[in-house]
Amino acid sequence: MAETIISLEGVTKRFGTFEALKKVDLTVALGERMVICGPSGSGKSTLIRCINRLEEHDEGRIVVDGRELDQDTRNVAAIRREVGMVFQQFNLFPHLTVLDNLTLAPMRARGMSRKDAEEVARLYLDRVHIPEQADKYPAQLSGGQQQRVAIARSLCMRPRIMLFDEPTSALDPEMISEVLDVMVELAREGMTMIVVTHEMGFAREVADTMVFMDGGEIVEKATPAEFFVQPKSERTSLFLSRILAH
């Protein structure tokens, strides 16, 4: 059995009286590629935001890479160094060049010299196929290019885990594939990934595990072969029939 790198036990998250997550149990193995899908408001984004402590869970345990996410801020900081996150919005600093956006965190959080940080940044810009954009500002790039910069920025921290929260939902249709292509490459290289997405073609191609959420709960967890061909839950079947019809 592969080593467990993420573990959630009985995780509950409330916003006021609304329970966004209801006693969720989930494990992710080192190198596993998990795709989480479900209707809007099902708790998908809240789940991965809790893994990175962007949201603080109310009950249960979350252990990431051997460290529990608790009130110890040192644990939170350590986990964030090992977990890269890519959002719907690119969240790039508009006043910094692409290269400066990429070197900022490695220099501050990992104590890298500018020379080393720039070397790493150029390596990952090459990996996401936009090395020629290093000296441009975000506003000079297309949405797809900006999202690839955001992925490169996360990779510059050399994370063990990558979290993607609907990374293509803010993109024009023609830009989606260029971002998904980069994610497919990462997946094939064995990066541990949790991806919240409605891109079912991507899910079929790279996922080891499909997770379907609804109403703050995990309704179904299965291999892509089982999930797409023989879903066990009626809720899963209904969701798939709607999403695959588009």
Image (tube, rainbow, N blue to C red):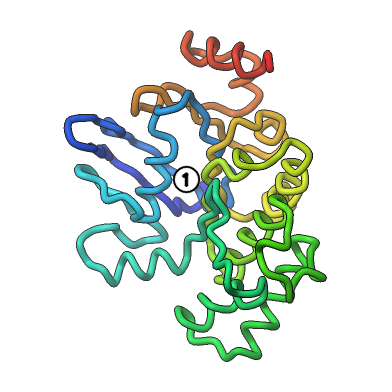
Q: What residue is drawn where x is 34% and y is 54%? A: 63
**Residue 90, how many percent across, how many down?**
57, 55
| Residue 129 position (above or below residue 15) | below
Q: Nearer the viewer, residue 196 or 150?
A: 150
Residue 41 sits in quarter: top left
Q: What residue is drawn where x is 54% and y is 65%? A: 159
Q: Secondary structure at mark 1?
A: strand
**Residue 98, how many percent across, how many down?**
66, 71
Left or right: 46, with 174 as reference point: left
Give the amino acid type for the residue marked by disc 1 in the picture. Val
Q: Look at the image and tell me in which quarter the C terminus lies.
A: top right
| Residue 99 position (above or below residue 208) | below
Q: Which residue is mark 1?
A: 28
Q: Nearer the viewer, residue 35 or 90?
A: 90
**Can residue 164 be seen here?**
no
Residue ranking furthest to the left:
17
**Residue 208, how many percent across, how many down?**
61, 37
Q: What residue is drawn where x is 26% and y is 39%? A: 13
**Residue 179, how many percent across, how many down?**
71, 48
Left or right: 199, with 222 as reference point: right
Crowdedness near tag 1: few (<14), some (14–19) or many (≥20) residues, C-alpha within 10 Å? many
